[in-house]
Amino acid sequence: MLAIILAAGKGTRMRSAVPKVMHKVGGLEMVRHVIAATQAAGIKDCALVVSEGADWAQKLEGAPATHVQDPPLGTAHAVLAARTAVTADHDAVLVLFADNPLMRAETIANVCARVEAGADVVVLAFQAADPAGYGRVLLDENGVAAIREERDASDAERQVTLCNSGIMAIRTGAAFHALDEIGCQNAKGEYYLTDLVAIARAKGLTVAVEEAPADEVLGVNDRAQLAEAEAVFQQRMRAAVLHHATLEAPQTVFFSHDTVLHEDVHVEPHVVFGPGVEVARGARVRAFSHLEGATVGEGASIGPYARLRPGSDIGPKARVGNFV
């Protein structure tokens, strides 16, 4: 499997000098969340599609090879910009978006499994409480019949709540070559990846659907959606930590993507864990403390109102008091 991550969008709605996909969720750039998810799913080969002049991609540590989409002419055109990354060793291509920071490795693996089971194209969809604005995934007895954009949908089709996430797996060979047949008969003059479904079905290829929770495929286009993604990420981290550690007021504790709390750690209200923190078994972090780039030994006590800066190494049973 080759993962092609689309990151060529301008992100103008962010109103920021920072490229959209470099904004952080849980202290990690959104594009790096997606790369990490593909790697955790067992996908080793990855290509990153960027716009002309995207020097940010060269600054990503361990970034995949980049392919330039210039000019930007839609999602299908973006996938084909990375055509040279597809080799005879690849059985399929997985198309992901760099502004989907909440994508889980398990979901990626599920999509890949559908290809392994024989599907030529797999559409990742989600059930929307309010489907307005999303493309609808229309099903029949043979799988996905079409993806209908809302403006083109009938009244009956608009009642469908199964919506397109944009993420798609495409078997190499006939299905991938069908991308060349996508036209641009639309107002924007762009080549839409969703048009592959109808073309594949016309060729007698199998188009399957895999579902994911709606929050997992949340795309970030503006600051409000970035805050929404951060909220989902924090809730996930709190739920994971509560399996083995105590959070007195979970909604007031904030984590980074790499925070590690071991068993029987006790965290009081209003604590912030910046990147690079590991807290050993039985330690206590008292209220209003801020930790970043620090290790805390077994049974240690931090705070309240303590600040541990990068490089801090607190030994077992040590005590760091107020306003340190």
Image: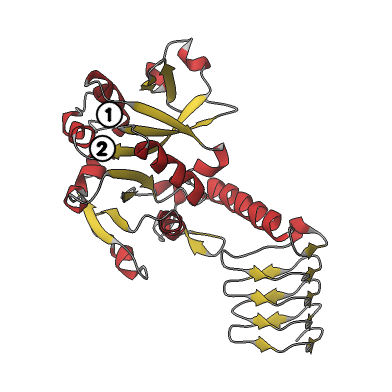
Callout 1 amino acid: Leu
In the rendered image, is residue 133 in sight?
A: no
Dot 1: few (<14), some (14–19), or many (≥20) neighbours within 10 Å? many
Q: Examine the rendered structure and indicate whether residue 34 appears above or below residue 322.
A: above
Q: Residue at x 35, y 69 (%)?
A: 62
Q: Measuring from the top left, give residue 30's x and y in whole percent.
A: 46, 56
Q: Residue at x 48, y 46 (%)?
A: 220
Q: Residue at x 22, y 55 (%)?
A: 67
Q: Measuring from the top left, give residue 9's x and y in whole percent.
A: 34, 47
Provide the residue designation for mark 1: 196
Callout 2 amino acid: Ala
Q: Measuring from the top left, give residue 229's x and y in whole percent.
A: 56, 49
Residue 202 location, quadrant: top left
- Mark 1 and mark 2: span between their CA atoms? 8 Å
Q: In screen coordinates, is 169 left or right of 99?
A: left
Q: Quadrant of the C terminus?
A: bottom right
Give the number of the disc on residue 156. none
Colour scheme of the picture: secondary structure
Q: Measuring from the top left, give residue 109's x and y in whole percent.
A: 44, 46
Give SS at disc 2.
Answer: helix
Q: Examine the rendered structure and indicate whether residue 111 appears above or below residue 61.
A: above
Q: Residue at x 21, y 34 (%)?
A: 179
As drawn, which residue projects farthest toward the front? 117
Provide the residue designation for mark 2: 76
Q: Examine the rendered structure and indicate whether residue 294 appears above or below residue 144.
A: below
Tell which of 296 and 140 is nearer to you. Answer: 140
Give SS at disc 1.
Answer: helix
Q: Are marks 1 and 2 in contact (CB under 8 Å)?
A: yes
Sequence order check, earlier mark of 1 and 2: 2
